[in-house]
Amino acid sequence: MEKVYGLIGFPVEHSLSPLMHNDAFVRLGIPARYHLFSVHPKQVSEAIAGVRALGIAGVNVTIPHKMAVIPFLDDIDDHARRIGAVNTIVNDNGRLVGYNTDGPGYVKALEEEMDVSLDGKRILVIGAGGGARGIYFSLLSTAAKRIDMTNRTVEKAEQLVREGEDGRSAYFSLAEAETRLDEYDIMINTTSVGMHPRVEAQPLSLERLQPGTIVSDIIYNPLETKWLKEAKARGARVQNGVGMLVYQGALAFEKWTGQWPDVNRMKQLVIEALRR
């Protein structure tokens, strides 16, 4: 019998997840299908009850439901609990367990795509929203030397650092962070600044950027933001958000099926779709 997987969010029509997962099911010979489920914010409890009642094998969760689903699950893993958000649910014989693969997916993409070990690295994370939380707490599990935070509202960066309870982290205003860019090996934009349609905006001035710095942006539309273009022109190594999208999906796929999909194939499909 074909298993059912899917994505719940509002809206979901733009998602590239079906493209990645359905292709992977076919290539691995898994009888399953991935669907999009548009769930109004007032119907989250009913949606999760439907996952349980219908025997849906697993779902991804996207905006705005990543926090809202938690009270309706049977359990969540420690990483998702610390972040306070779930993006993957596994139906284990009627027991619904929540995970968050966003941060681990980002870190895996960064290490593999940029061929870099994070050991001893000095990292600056820009932003303090949901994307930043997952990435920041995942970075704390690495052997990075420093993991600093900066945000337009500096109080939010301060709060995140305090939650992390890690002596490797400090927080700065955007203006102060801009004066310290030469201190970092890796810079990560977790905000939506520069995303389509506001493609001219940049999250941070790169005036003091050092050549060879890794500059990473979780945005994938456009594939190369204005910020990444400037970073590249200044001699940086750049990474867009496609890798995070693919690897968080691959980690979810593995939790559902026990199999690791072809991430290069997933990436190729996503890039082709975005270029179209």
Image (spheres, rainbow, N blue to C red):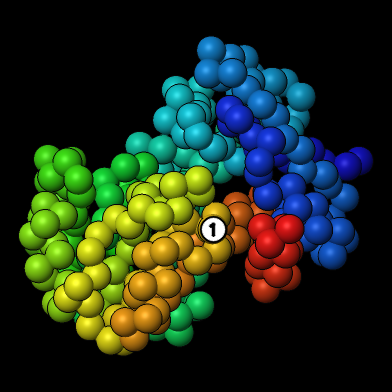
Assess disc 1: are there few (<14), some (14-19) or many (≥20) residues with their C-alpha within 10 Å of its C-alpha.
Answer: some
Residue in view at x 35 percent, y 37 percent: 84
Marker count (numbered): 1
Q: Is residue 152 visible?
A: yes
The local secondary structure at tag 1 comes to loop
Residue at (91%, 41%) from the top-left corner? 1
Of all residues, the one furthest to the front in this rendering is: 200
Task: Classify 54 as above or below 180.
Answer: above
Q: Is residue 159 visible?
A: no
Q: Which residue reaches farthest right?
A: 1
For the point 55% across and 63% down, which residue is it?
223
Q: Nearer the viewer, residue 207 or 243?
A: 207
Q: Which residue is mark 1?
A: 222
Q: Where is 51 relative to 123, above or below? A: above
Give left or right: position of 77 versus 14.
left
Q: Which residue sits at x=15%, y=64%?
A: 178
Q: Amino acid at mark 1?
A: Pro
Q: Position of residue 274 (x, y in %)?
A: 66, 58
Q: Is residue 240 above or below residue 192?
A: below
Q: Which image quarter holds the C terminus? A: bottom right
Quadrant of residue 117 within the rendered picture = bottom left
